[in-house]
Image (spheres, rainbow, N blue to C red):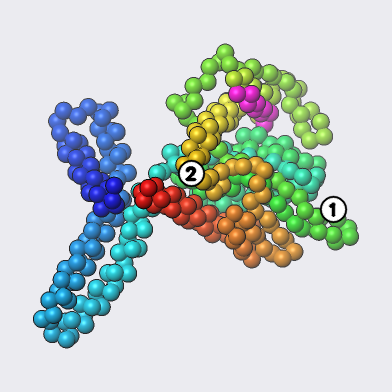
Amino acid sequence: MSLDAALDQILERYDQIQNDMAGSGVTPEVYVKLSKEFSDLGPVVEAVKALKSAKNEAADLAEMLAAGDMDPEMKAMANEEFTALKERVPELEHAVKILLLPKDEADDRNAILEVRAGTGGEEAALFAGDLFRMYQRYAELRRWKVEIMEASESDLGGYREIVASITGTGAYARLKFESGVHRVQRVPDTETSGRIHTSAATVAVLPEAEDVDVDVDEKDLRIDVYRSSGAGGQHVNTTDSAVRITHEPTGIVVAVQDERSQHKNKAKAMKILRAKIYEAERERQDSERAAERKGQVGSGDRSERIRTYNFPQGRVSDHRINLTLYKLDKMMLGEALDEVVDALTAEDQAERLAALDTNADA
């Protein structure tokens, strides 16, 4: 199907929805569904109308210029306007194609963020803490809410592991490309000779699942309770409040000991478990479509080194898109993260557009 035919179908569907919503026989459930589709199509229709308007204006001007009976001043003005429209039409077409790309259904979800120390011992744990604070500051800038679900601190104040829920508009869409291995190069505070060390931390970003997304049967769960302990094995609670839940069909295990209440720890663990099961199902579906889609930027491959933070040079490099910024200080404050996220999003859109064009030509 040509692009013009697809756009005509969208306009027809938009008008049809409007008529259906105005009808007397529509049920409340159907009305809600139609209302959402109408709202989702709104920006697309606006862009399509702008494109069609520009194309029609260009065609009218071309016809006027071809007639050849215009005075020189009018012809110069028409030529100038025609040239501007010819440049604008491809930009409008690109904008429409971006809006037509299949949307990740999880983009509007809240996110579960997991940061874990990798290779590098105590320095890796300190770096994991720095990364988490970077995301925490980024969330504050975007007015998102951050709730720590589980944390295992290291002896020097870093994190061996920290899990948080991030609630806010577009949280998953903005953070999903952060999944992977993050590497740091710097002189640790504990290093007396000034030698640069390399260590790493892994980041996983999961879309938060809703109850309707994941049907978890209580019979499939093995729930163990035990006594919480802090860094170095010191007991921070004298009751069995820590909870470990194993989802036996998938083998997914979640342990939470952050709260003193066993009930609260279980609720947090279930929230993380649902997100993990939901993401596992999404990855399974993605793998089935892998032959049609040549991978996805930020797919969450834990073995892939995605970014390096070089403190001596004040630089951060994202290896997936060969982007280097000499704004490490702003990056760690969360202020420059949008530059990287925007570039990754643009690259992802370009890859998906290329796949869309290839399929359209086939």
Asked whether the viewer can see residue 124, the reply is: yes
Looking at the image, which is closer to me, 321 or 202? Answer: 321
Q: Residues within 10 Å of mark 2 (few under 14, many from 20)?
A: some
Looking at the image, which is closer to me, 301 or 39? Answer: 301
Q: Residues within 10 Å of mark 1 (few under 14, many from 20)?
A: few
Looking at the image, which is closer to me, 348 or 271? Answer: 348
Q: Is residue 251 magenta?
A: yes
Kind of residue sitting beneath label 1:
Thr
What residue lies at 23% left-to-right and 58% top-to-bottom?
A: 52
**Residue sitting at the far front:** 362
Residue 303: x and y in percent read 67, 43
What residue lies at 66% left-to-right and 34% top-to-bottom?
A: 150
Element on which disc 1 rests: loop
Left of 362 or right of it: where is 177? right
Magenta range is: 250-258
What residue lies at 28% left-to-right and 74% top-to-bottom?
A: 83
Work out whether 117 lies above or below 59.
above
**Residue sitting at the far right:** 193
Hey, which quadrant is residue 318 in on the image? bottom right
The residue tagged 1 is 190
Q: Which mark is residue 293?
A: 2
Left of 254 or right of it: where is 226? right
